[in-house]
Image: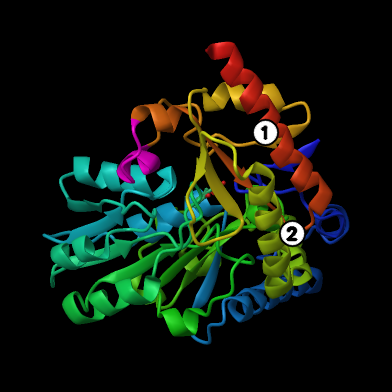
Amino acid sequence: MIYLDNAATTKMFEESASVYKEYACTNFFNPSAGYGKAVEISKKLDEVRELLKKRLSVDKGDIIFTGGATESNNLAIRGSVRSGKWEYVFSEGEHPSVYNVAKALEQEGHIVHIIPLGKNGQVDYDEIEKVLNDKTRLISVMHVSNETGAINDIKRIKAHRDRLSPKALLHVDGVQAFCKIPFSLNDLGIDLYTISAHKFHGPKGVGALYVKNKQGLKNIIFGGGQEGGYRSGTENVAGIMAMAKSCEMIDTEKNLEKVKRLNSIFKHAISGVDGIEYIEAGSPYIISLSFAGVNGETLMRDVQDEVIVGMGSACSAKKAGNRVLQSMGYSAEKIKSSIRVSFNAYLDEEDVAYAGEMLVKKYLDLRERVR
Ligand code: PMP
Protein backbone atom coordinates (compact mmCIF):
# COMPACT_ATOMS: atom_id res chain seq x y z
CA MET A 1 0.00 0.00 0.00
CA ILE A 2 1.37 3.40 -0.99
CA TYR A 3 0.06 6.01 1.43
CA LEU A 4 -0.38 9.45 -0.14
CA ASP A 5 -2.69 11.09 2.40
CA ASN A 6 -0.03 12.53 4.66
CA ALA A 7 -1.84 15.85 5.04
CA ALA A 8 -4.55 13.92 6.92
CA THR A 9 -2.06 12.19 9.18
CA THR A 10 1.37 10.62 9.11
CA LYS A 11 2.71 7.35 10.41
CA MET A 12 4.43 7.74 13.78
CA PHE A 13 8.20 7.10 13.79
CA GLU A 14 9.09 3.85 15.58
CA GLU A 15 11.58 5.85 17.66
CA SER A 16 8.81 8.21 18.78
CA ALA A 17 6.61 5.24 19.67
CA SER A 18 9.46 3.93 21.88
CA VAL A 19 9.73 7.29 23.61
CA TYR A 20 5.94 7.29 24.03
CA LYS A 21 6.14 3.89 25.73
CA GLU A 22 8.95 5.00 28.01
CA TYR A 23 6.93 7.98 29.26
CA ALA A 24 3.67 6.04 29.45
CA CYS A 25 4.95 2.94 31.24
CA THR A 26 8.22 3.80 33.01
CA ASN A 27 8.53 7.54 33.52
CA PHE A 28 4.79 7.95 33.93
CA PHE A 29 4.80 10.50 36.79
CA ASN A 30 2.47 13.47 36.95
CA PRO A 31 4.57 16.57 36.17
CA SER A 32 2.54 18.64 38.66
CA ALA A 33 3.51 16.44 41.64
CA GLY A 34 6.19 17.58 44.09
CA TYR A 35 8.58 14.60 44.38
CA GLY A 36 11.82 14.37 42.46
CA LYS A 37 10.70 12.06 39.69
CA ALA A 38 7.74 14.29 38.89
CA VAL A 39 9.86 17.42 38.98
CA GLU A 40 12.19 15.75 36.47
CA ILE A 41 9.25 15.21 34.11
CA SER A 42 8.24 18.82 34.52
CA LYS A 43 11.80 19.84 33.55
CA LYS A 44 11.62 17.56 30.50
CA LEU A 45 8.45 19.34 29.39
CA ASP A 46 10.24 22.67 29.74
CA GLU A 47 13.04 21.31 27.57
CA VAL A 48 10.47 20.41 24.92
CA ARG A 49 9.12 23.97 25.08
CA GLU A 50 12.62 25.23 24.35
CA LEU A 51 13.08 22.69 21.55
CA LEU A 52 9.84 23.76 19.89
CA LYS A 53 10.73 27.44 20.21
CA LYS A 54 14.09 26.71 18.63
CA ARG A 55 12.41 24.84 15.78
CA LEU A 56 10.04 27.76 15.34
CA SER A 57 13.06 30.11 15.37
CA VAL A 58 11.64 32.34 18.05
CA ASP A 59 13.28 33.85 21.15
CA LYS A 60 10.40 35.36 23.07
CA GLY A 61 7.11 33.78 24.12
CA ASP A 62 5.74 30.52 25.50
CA ILE A 63 4.60 27.10 24.37
CA ILE A 64 1.29 25.77 25.70
CA PHE A 65 0.80 22.05 25.16
CA THR A 66 -2.67 21.09 23.95
CA GLY A 67 -4.65 18.09 22.77
CA GLY A 68 -3.88 18.87 19.11
CA ALA A 69 -4.37 21.63 16.60
CA THR A 70 -8.14 21.79 16.91
CA GLU A 71 -7.72 22.73 20.55
CA SER A 72 -4.81 25.10 19.84
CA ASN A 73 -6.92 26.92 17.24
CA ASN A 74 -9.90 27.16 19.59
CA LEU A 75 -7.68 28.47 22.39
CA ALA A 76 -6.00 31.01 20.11
CA ILE A 77 -9.30 32.39 18.80
CA ARG A 78 -11.60 32.08 21.79
CA GLY A 79 -8.76 33.18 24.05
CA SER A 80 -8.38 36.39 22.02
CA VAL A 81 -12.06 37.36 22.05
CA ARG A 82 -12.87 40.45 24.12
CA SER A 83 -16.16 41.99 25.04
CA GLY A 84 -17.13 45.14 23.20
CA LYS A 85 -17.21 46.04 19.55
CA TRP A 86 -14.15 44.23 18.25
CA GLU A 87 -13.77 42.69 14.80
CA TYR A 88 -12.34 39.32 13.80
CA VAL A 89 -10.81 38.41 10.43
CA PHE A 90 -10.48 34.90 8.97
CA SER A 91 -9.88 33.40 5.55
CA GLU A 92 -12.30 31.21 3.66
CA GLY A 93 -9.50 28.66 3.35
CA GLU A 94 -9.24 27.87 7.05
CA HIS A 95 -9.53 24.39 8.50
CA PRO A 96 -12.90 23.74 10.23
CA SER A 97 -11.18 24.09 13.62
CA VAL A 98 -10.78 27.79 12.76
CA TYR A 99 -13.61 28.35 10.31
CA ASN A 100 -16.32 26.89 12.52
CA VAL A 101 -15.12 28.93 15.48
CA ALA A 102 -15.41 32.01 13.25
CA LYS A 103 -18.97 31.02 12.36
CA ALA A 104 -19.79 30.50 16.05
CA LEU A 105 -18.44 33.98 16.89
CA GLU A 106 -20.62 35.42 14.17
CA GLN A 107 -23.67 33.70 15.62
CA GLU A 108 -22.81 35.05 19.03
CA GLY A 109 -23.03 38.57 17.58
CA HIS A 110 -19.38 39.42 16.95
CA ILE A 111 -18.32 41.22 13.80
CA VAL A 112 -16.59 38.59 11.66
CA HIS A 113 -15.01 39.09 8.24
CA ILE A 114 -14.35 36.01 6.12
CA ILE A 115 -11.88 36.82 3.36
CA PRO A 116 -12.14 34.92 0.05
CA LEU A 117 -9.28 33.11 -1.65
CA GLY A 118 -7.67 33.88 -4.98
CA LYS A 119 -7.39 31.33 -7.81
CA ASN A 120 -3.99 30.24 -6.48
CA GLY A 121 -5.50 29.26 -3.12
CA GLN A 122 -3.91 32.13 -1.20
CA VAL A 123 -6.05 34.55 0.76
CA ASP A 124 -6.97 37.75 -1.08
CA TYR A 125 -4.54 40.22 0.55
CA ASP A 126 -6.31 43.30 -0.84
CA GLU A 127 -9.58 42.18 0.74
CA ILE A 128 -7.81 41.76 4.09
CA GLU A 129 -6.43 45.27 3.75
CA LYS A 130 -9.94 46.61 3.09
CA VAL A 131 -11.48 45.23 6.30
CA LEU A 132 -8.68 45.99 8.75
CA ASN A 133 -9.17 48.91 11.13
CA ASP A 134 -8.31 49.90 14.68
CA LYS A 135 -11.18 47.77 16.04
CA THR A 136 -9.70 44.57 14.60
CA ARG A 137 -8.90 42.26 17.50
CA LEU A 138 -7.68 39.13 15.69
CA ILE A 139 -6.55 38.06 12.22
CA SER A 140 -6.38 34.29 11.76
CA VAL A 141 -4.94 33.02 8.46
CA MET A 142 -3.32 29.63 7.95
CA HIS A 143 0.29 29.24 6.86
CA VAL A 144 -0.03 26.34 4.38
CA SER A 145 -3.40 25.16 3.09
CA ASN A 146 -4.22 21.57 3.98
CA GLU A 147 -6.36 21.37 0.84
CA THR A 148 -4.08 22.81 -1.84
CA GLY A 149 -0.65 23.41 -0.31
CA ALA A 150 -0.97 27.14 -1.04
CA ILE A 151 1.39 29.18 1.16
CA ASN A 152 0.00 32.44 2.47
CA ASP A 153 2.30 35.43 2.61
CA ILE A 154 2.21 35.97 6.36
CA LYS A 155 4.71 38.83 6.22
CA ARG A 156 2.40 40.73 3.91
CA ILE A 157 -0.55 40.17 6.26
CA LYS A 158 1.57 41.27 9.20
CA ALA A 159 2.58 44.45 7.36
CA HIS A 160 -1.12 45.26 6.80
CA ARG A 161 -1.79 44.49 10.47
CA ASP A 162 1.04 46.72 11.71
CA ARG A 163 -0.13 49.62 9.57
CA LEU A 164 -3.92 49.37 9.94
CA SER A 165 -4.71 47.35 13.07
CA PRO A 166 -1.85 47.66 15.54
CA LYS A 167 -4.02 46.31 18.36
CA ALA A 168 -4.89 43.10 16.48
CA LEU A 169 -3.31 39.74 17.29
CA LEU A 170 -2.11 37.61 14.38
CA HIS A 171 -2.85 33.89 14.67
CA VAL A 172 -1.50 31.39 12.16
CA ASP A 173 -2.47 27.74 11.88
CA GLY A 174 0.90 26.22 11.03
CA VAL A 175 -0.15 22.57 11.02
CA GLN A 176 0.89 21.92 7.40
CA ALA A 177 4.01 24.10 7.64
CA PHE A 178 5.84 23.12 10.83
CA CYS A 179 8.65 20.60 10.19
CA LYS A 180 7.76 20.80 6.47
CA ILE A 181 8.80 24.20 5.17
CA PRO A 182 11.49 26.42 6.68
CA PHE A 183 10.41 29.66 8.36
CA SER A 184 11.25 31.78 11.35
CA LEU A 185 8.64 33.15 13.76
CA ASN A 186 11.16 35.85 14.71
CA ASP A 187 10.95 37.05 11.09
CA LEU A 188 7.21 36.58 10.66
CA GLY A 189 6.26 38.33 13.91
CA ILE A 190 3.26 36.11 14.63
CA ASP A 191 1.48 36.32 18.01
CA LEU A 192 -0.06 32.85 18.06
CA TYR A 193 1.04 29.76 16.10
CA THR A 194 -0.62 26.32 16.05
CA ILE A 195 1.11 22.97 15.53
CA SER A 196 -0.01 19.34 15.66
CA ALA A 197 2.24 16.31 16.29
CA HIS A 198 0.49 13.75 14.08
CA LYS A 199 1.26 15.76 10.95
CA PHE A 200 5.00 15.29 11.47
CA HIS A 201 5.23 11.62 12.44
CA GLY A 202 4.25 12.14 16.08
CA PRO A 203 1.23 10.85 17.99
CA LYS A 204 -2.35 11.96 17.49
CA GLY A 205 -4.12 14.07 20.10
CA VAL A 206 -1.17 16.27 21.02
CA GLY A 207 -0.04 19.64 19.78
CA ALA A 208 0.94 23.08 20.96
CA LEU A 209 0.12 26.74 20.73
CA TYR A 210 2.97 29.22 20.60
CA VAL A 211 2.00 32.44 22.39
CA LYS A 212 4.14 35.55 22.06
CA ASN A 213 2.50 37.33 24.97
CA LYS A 214 0.38 35.30 27.36
CA GLN A 215 -1.11 38.43 28.89
CA GLY A 216 -3.08 38.90 25.67
CA LEU A 217 -4.72 35.47 25.95
CA LYS A 218 -7.64 34.26 28.08
CA ASN A 219 -7.83 30.62 29.09
CA ILE A 220 -10.81 28.62 27.87
CA ILE A 221 -10.41 25.46 29.95
CA PHE A 222 -10.75 25.76 33.72
CA GLY A 223 -9.32 23.28 36.18
CA GLY A 224 -6.08 22.57 38.01
CA GLY A 225 -4.15 25.41 36.40
CA GLN A 226 -1.59 23.40 34.42
CA GLU A 227 0.27 25.07 31.55
CA GLY A 228 0.42 28.33 33.47
CA GLY A 229 -3.36 28.27 33.82
CA TYR A 230 -3.86 28.42 30.05
CA ARG A 231 -4.70 24.74 29.61
CA SER A 232 -5.80 22.87 32.69
CA GLY A 233 -5.60 19.09 32.70
CA THR A 234 -2.63 16.79 33.29
CA GLU A 235 -0.25 17.12 30.37
CA ASN A 236 -0.07 14.27 27.86
CA VAL A 237 3.54 13.65 28.84
CA ALA A 238 4.11 10.57 26.66
CA GLY A 239 2.56 12.35 23.67
CA ILE A 240 4.60 15.49 24.23
CA MET A 241 7.87 13.57 24.59
CA ALA A 242 7.09 11.53 21.46
CA MET A 243 6.23 14.74 19.59
CA ALA A 244 9.62 16.14 20.60
CA LYS A 245 11.35 13.00 19.32
CA SER A 246 9.64 13.29 15.93
CA CYS A 247 10.57 16.92 15.73
CA GLU A 248 14.21 16.16 16.54
CA MET A 249 14.36 13.44 13.91
CA ILE A 250 13.16 15.68 11.10
CA ASP A 251 15.59 17.66 8.98
CA THR A 252 13.15 20.13 7.41
CA GLU A 253 15.48 21.31 4.60
CA LYS A 254 16.57 17.81 3.63
CA ASN A 255 13.00 16.50 3.71
CA LEU A 256 11.82 19.43 1.62
CA GLU A 257 14.36 18.62 -1.11
CA LYS A 258 13.21 14.99 -1.12
CA VAL A 259 9.53 15.93 -1.25
CA LYS A 260 10.21 18.36 -4.11
CA ARG A 261 11.65 15.39 -6.03
CA LEU A 262 8.67 13.19 -5.16
CA ASN A 263 6.32 15.97 -6.25
CA SER A 264 7.97 16.28 -9.66
CA ILE A 265 8.16 12.49 -10.11
CA PHE A 266 4.43 12.29 -9.41
CA LYS A 267 3.62 15.16 -11.77
CA HIS A 268 5.76 13.58 -14.47
CA ALA A 269 3.81 10.31 -14.09
CA ILE A 270 0.47 12.06 -14.67
CA SER A 271 1.66 14.57 -17.26
CA GLY A 272 0.22 14.73 -20.74
CA VAL A 273 -3.05 13.05 -19.78
CA ASP A 274 -6.01 14.98 -21.09
CA GLY A 275 -8.50 15.80 -18.30
CA ILE A 276 -6.08 15.78 -15.37
CA GLU A 277 -5.39 19.21 -13.91
CA TYR A 278 -3.62 20.41 -10.82
CA ILE A 279 -2.75 23.78 -9.41
CA GLU A 280 0.81 24.88 -8.81
CA ALA A 281 0.56 25.78 -5.17
CA GLY A 282 3.42 26.54 -2.81
CA SER A 283 4.15 23.50 -0.67
CA PRO A 284 5.40 20.43 -2.56
CA TYR A 285 3.88 18.25 0.19
CA ILE A 286 0.34 18.70 -1.18
CA ILE A 287 -1.16 18.50 -4.67
CA SER A 288 -4.84 19.13 -5.35
CA LEU A 289 -5.87 17.41 -8.59
CA SER A 290 -8.99 17.16 -10.66
CA PHE A 291 -9.94 14.37 -13.06
CA ALA A 292 -12.47 15.70 -15.58
CA GLY A 293 -15.51 13.52 -16.13
CA VAL A 294 -15.09 11.19 -13.16
CA ASN A 295 -16.04 11.32 -9.51
CA GLY A 296 -13.00 11.84 -7.26
CA GLU A 297 -14.48 9.67 -4.55
CA THR A 298 -14.99 6.78 -6.98
CA LEU A 299 -11.41 7.12 -8.17
CA MET A 300 -10.16 7.18 -4.57
CA ARG A 301 -12.06 3.94 -3.86
CA ASP A 302 -10.87 2.33 -7.09
CA VAL A 303 -7.21 2.77 -6.22
CA GLN A 304 -7.38 2.30 -2.45
CA ASP A 305 -6.09 -1.28 -2.37
CA GLU A 306 -2.79 -0.09 -3.79
CA VAL A 307 -2.69 3.66 -3.36
CA ILE A 308 -4.32 5.77 -0.67
CA VAL A 309 -5.18 9.33 -1.65
CA GLY A 310 -7.34 11.89 0.13
CA MET A 311 -10.54 13.70 -0.68
CA GLY A 312 -9.42 17.08 0.60
CA SER A 313 -9.41 17.60 4.32
CA ALA A 314 -10.36 14.43 6.20
CA CYS A 315 -12.50 16.59 8.46
CA SER A 316 -14.55 17.89 5.54
CA ALA A 317 -14.38 14.76 3.39
CA LYS A 318 -17.66 13.47 4.71
CA LYS A 319 -19.46 16.69 3.87
CA ALA A 320 -20.75 17.58 0.44
CA GLY A 321 -18.80 20.14 -1.58
CA ASN A 322 -15.62 21.81 -0.58
CA ARG A 323 -15.67 25.37 0.75
CA VAL A 324 -11.98 25.95 0.03
CA LEU A 325 -12.02 24.89 -3.62
CA GLN A 326 -15.31 26.75 -4.07
CA SER A 327 -13.72 29.95 -2.80
CA MET A 328 -10.99 29.49 -5.42
CA GLY A 329 -13.66 29.55 -8.12
CA TYR A 330 -13.92 25.81 -8.86
CA SER A 331 -17.21 24.66 -10.39
CA ALA A 332 -19.29 22.08 -8.50
CA GLU A 333 -18.32 19.54 -11.16
CA LYS A 334 -14.60 20.20 -10.78
CA ILE A 335 -14.88 19.94 -7.00
CA LYS A 336 -16.56 16.54 -7.36
CA SER A 337 -13.74 15.33 -9.58
CA SER A 338 -11.00 16.46 -7.17
CA ILE A 339 -8.70 14.44 -4.98
CA ARG A 340 -5.74 15.40 -2.82
CA VAL A 341 -2.35 13.72 -2.92
CA SER A 342 0.05 14.46 -0.06
CA PHE A 343 3.56 13.16 0.52
CA ASN A 344 5.98 12.47 3.33
CA ALA A 345 9.74 12.57 2.94
CA TYR A 346 10.23 8.86 3.58
CA LEU A 347 8.37 7.60 0.52
CA ASP A 348 10.11 5.62 -2.16
CA GLU A 349 10.54 7.47 -5.48
CA GLU A 350 9.49 4.41 -7.50
CA ASP A 351 6.38 3.96 -5.39
CA VAL A 352 5.37 7.55 -6.03
CA ALA A 353 5.88 7.12 -9.79
CA TYR A 354 3.84 3.92 -9.66
CA ALA A 355 1.06 5.66 -7.72
CA GLY A 356 0.87 8.35 -10.41
CA GLU A 357 0.70 5.75 -13.18
CA MET A 358 -1.91 3.81 -11.27
CA LEU A 359 -4.11 6.88 -10.88
CA VAL A 360 -3.83 7.60 -14.60
CA LYS A 361 -4.72 4.01 -15.49
CA LYS A 362 -7.73 3.90 -13.17
CA TYR A 363 -8.83 7.33 -14.35
CA LEU A 364 -8.77 6.29 -18.00
CA ASP A 365 -10.64 3.05 -17.17
CA LEU A 366 -13.26 4.94 -15.19
CA ARG A 367 -13.71 7.54 -17.89
CA GLU A 368 -14.31 4.80 -20.44
CA ARG A 369 -16.91 3.22 -18.15
CA VAL A 370 -18.85 6.41 -17.50
CA ARG A 371 -18.96 7.41 -21.16
N1 PMP B 1 -5.41 22.72 10.91
C1 PMP B 1 -5.01 22.15 9.76
C2 PMP B 1 -4.47 23.02 8.66
C3 PMP B 1 -5.08 20.77 9.58
O1 PMP B 1 -4.68 20.22 8.44
C4 PMP B 1 -5.60 19.98 10.64
C5 PMP B 1 -5.72 18.47 10.50
N2 PMP B 1 -6.50 18.07 9.39
C6 PMP B 1 -6.01 20.62 11.82
C7 PMP B 1 -5.90 21.98 11.92
C8 PMP B 1 -6.57 19.84 12.99
O2 PMP B 1 -5.54 19.14 13.62
P1 PMP B 1 -5.78 18.07 14.80
O3 PMP B 1 -6.14 16.81 14.10
O4 PMP B 1 -4.47 18.00 15.50
O5 PMP B 1 -6.86 18.61 15.66
Give the image location of residue 56, x and y in percent. Answer: 57, 76
- Asked if marks 2 and 1 touch (Cβ < 8 Å), the reply is no
Q: How many marks?
A: 2
The magenta segment: 323-331
Q: Is residue 203 above or below residue 253?
A: above
Q: Position of residue 40 (x, y in %)?
A: 77, 74
Q: How far is mark 2 from mark 1, CA to CA?
A: 20 Å
Q: Residue at x 35, y 57 (%)?
A: 77
Numbered mark located on residue 359 in the image: 1
Viewer-proximal residue among 339 and 234: 339
Q: Nearer the viewer's eye, disc 2 or disc 1?
A: 1
Q: Residue tagged by mark 2?
A: 345
Q: Is residue 337 visible?
A: yes
Q: Residue at x 59, y 69 (%)?
A: 181
Name the residue at 73% across, 72% down.
254
Q: Amino acid at mark 1?
A: Leu
The figure's colour scheme reads: rainbow
